[in-house]
Image (spheres, grey):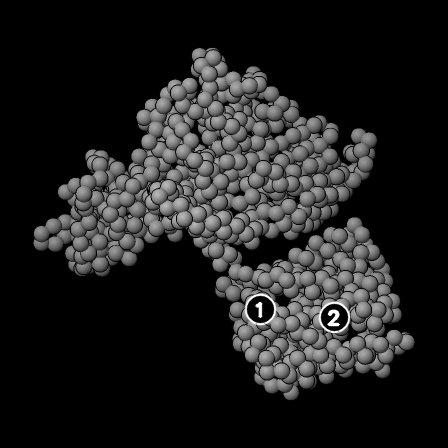
Amino acid sequence: MTCISRAVPAWAVARRHPSSRSVRVPPASRRPSRNILSRFEKLSAAIGRLGVSDLETRGALRTDVLGLIDHVPAGRARACVSLRLVAEALRPDRDRGDRQPALHQAARALLDAVRGYLASPKARDRLSVIEGPERSTIAIMRNLPDRRPPSVVARAESLPALALPNDTDRSLLGDFCDEAREYIESAEAALLVLERQPDNGDAAQTVMRAFHSIKGTAGFLKLDGLVALAHHGESLLGERRRRDGFAGRVAALSLRALDALRDTVANLDASRAGAALAYPPDFLDVLRELEAIDAEPGAAAVEHGGSRTAAVATARDGAATHSARVRLDRLDALVDLVGELVVAHWMIAQDPETGHDHPELARKVAHAGKLVRDLHDMSMGLRMVPLRGTCNKLVRLARDLAERAGKQVDCRVDGEMTELDRNMVELVADPLMHMVRNAIDHGIEPPDERRACGKPAAGCLTLRATQMNGQVVVAVSDDGRGLQRDRILERAQARGLVRPGEVLSDADVLDLIFAPGLSTAQQVTDVSGRGVGMDVVRRNIQALHGRVDVHSMPAQGTTITLRVPLTLAITDGLLVRVGEERYIVPTTNVVVSVRPERAALFTVGGRGEMVRLRHDVLPLVRLHQLLGVHGASEDPTAALLMVVGAGDRRCALLVDAILGQQQVVAKPVTAGIGEVAGIAGAAILGDGRVGLILDVPQILDLARRAQPNAQAVA
Amino acid sequence: MSAAAGKYLTFFLGAEEYGMEIRAVHEIIGMLPITRVPRTPPVVRGVINLRGRVISILDLRRRFDLPALEPGPTSCIIVVAAHAAHVGLLVDRVSEVADIAAADIAPPPPLGGGAHTDFLVGIAKSAARVRLLLDISRVVDADDLAAAGPDDGAPTAA
């Protein structure tokens, strides 16, 4: 049912949002397809602001308006049909209240503007070059006999098995899965917001939009089950939530509905690769529950209070058009190529031919260098994504786990907009999940136990992300019982990780949680406690040239901190010479380089070499020995000590000389060799030869093993 | 697994002639400067820059426990695709692409667990010579390589 909101008069909205009028005057455009699309987006947003608060109708309007894009080149007549539909939906006699004339007028003006524009031959030309993500919508439109969303919703008891019609366009299905995943992700984030702020209309709107959009596309793909689920999900979040509030059954069922959607989409996606297609196990249960709640009396009598949120939601719709979806492999290829360009340019700049004799050429090369650097920075930025999505998943996980374990937990997220290379985000997600699992399962106590210790019944889990010195630091903290030093030590001794009688510092004991096979859980649960976990976390993070540290106070909680570089693709490094070999030391790891005084060198126990540098005493690591290089300088006072660090560990590396600073594209060296300890990757140097990038954390580990006395390395 | 008939790239290590299925071969390149990779088994010569890609080079002499020999003017790197990656194999000399008929292929002789019998999938005999046919995916098996060359964390040179 169409219902016009009375809370915000349409003319007032239209005046406050001048963008809704920009449709009338199409500015000259260099990017025709985008501009037209954004104009249509604005149109549909404007219609939304006109006050149609019934989401389904507004969604249909939007769909129709987008549908125009496809129909116009084929003939204006059909476009007019769509426009008539829009006009029909906005017909004033369907509405009550005294704002109708203004509303009607505004809608007419907008539609006239679009009609006029679409009639021009210029628009026709431009409309033929639409590309990008909108293509799937357009493809949908093309196959759409009736542009209205399906009005008959399938019932759970008569739902046929999940299947795709034979003529399904597989690439369309892929687009659908991608889109659906994005919607589900945003909906999930919004649900978590709703949980904390049940009255947050924006968040509810986001979830409804997700359900609605999935419903629409699923309808075109004839996925009746998904349509039904999304339909009921939408009304659950809409009418039911407005009536009952977002709590209890509504909240729980929303999450389950979203999970069922996600699992179904995952199955659909897998089916493209040939997997058998079926609904996830609890799909029908969730659908039945949704149907039951929808059929309860009272659902039809709806108080519409969503106008305020509608304006916000549509404004966001408009903002979304300013981003484009790009295939990841293309993005990766671009970033790689730009990386190579940086190196290639560096080779030119370093060429003696370019240098002194041709100042004019040198100037041009320098100018090109600036552009290349800018391009490089920009291309790296393209792949940066905020950690928000990951944080949302973690909060959700924490919530689910706590519920299952009968614990209460408040999640706090700080710095969720911290950006990280997209590839990196995926790689840190698993370790972070392990960390959250541990915090809930082992860290936070059951409510009774907490009360007995004088703590609030609900535990607190904090996720904090920051960017620091080219690294992203993510800390997962809980205020639980803390790690039990004695239990860890006991277990480690039982497993032979620690010799009886061996004296370990507290930090060393805590560090044992990263040892393989050590678990202090008193009981094995289905989430963690199988003795795997933290060792995997450390291994995965080290593979990313990152580091994991643990801090814990008994009865106060545990913080596990993970540090990873922003990106794995490009390394800013110092090129050093060791004997005949050259290595790249990542600049982020380099603290300072010095040529030491003889007096600053000393040994510990006749074995561990140390160097005193100002206030620090650092272990001296002979890189040539560690890496087996011949012909390197043996005398630190005649060579150079490069102080390197990772996390809070430091050491002084003995190198022959620093040859220069260079940005390199890190490439793996594993093929046919496997992981090489101490080597993070390889890069092409200026002379075309391969240089190896040192993995400083691993070098520190190797050095520690080679010099067990040198405690300061730890 | 036994060797199939077809086209083989043959090459020499010392006096022995070996063959590998041509479809495993990506390209053949002359010697390029090799960057040594520390803490790897001796069979790994290092890595090279192949048009912007870093690929590792295995010394087939060392792989087959033959006497070591520094690369000479006829030395070549055969780049093969195996285990979803490219690996270069250092050989003394590339010989030819030979068509080997099924009738000429005999199963590998039971040599009593000699080091490189694992890689042998057949012996091609013709009037003039004997060629040892290799299973390249086994030759470049990373796990096997790690096992083959002891790397106990000690420096490879003092």
**Which chain contains the residue that carries disc 2?**
A
Instruction: Tell which residue pokes out farthest to the left in this image.
Output: B127
Residue B54 in sight in this render: no
Q: Residue beneath label 2, please?
A: A20
- Relative height, residue B129 to residue A511 (above, below): below
Q: Nearer the viewer, residue A154 or A515?
A: A515
Q: Is residue A610 toward the left or the right of residue A361 in the image?
A: right
Q: Nearer the viewer, residue A368 or B135?
A: A368
Q: Earlier in the sequence, mark 1 or mark 2?
A: 2
Q: What residue is shown at x 79% (from left), y 76% (from top)?
A: A106
Q: Is residue A454 toward the left or the right of residue A548 in the image?
A: right
Quarter of the figure with residue A296: bottom right
Decide: few, some or many residues near mark 1? Use Cα within 10 Å; few <14, some 14-19, many ≥20: few
Q: What residue is shown at x 62% (from left), y 36% (from top)?
A: A561
- The quarter of the rendered structure image containing the N terminus of chain A is bottom right
Quarter of the figure with residue A243: bottom right
- Relative height, residue A472 to residue A319 (above, below): above
**Which chain contains the residue that carries disc 1?**
A
Q: Amino acid at mark 2?
A: Ser
Q: Amino acid at mark 1?
A: Arg
x%, y% of residue A150?
69, 76
Q: Residue beneath label 1, please?
A: A31
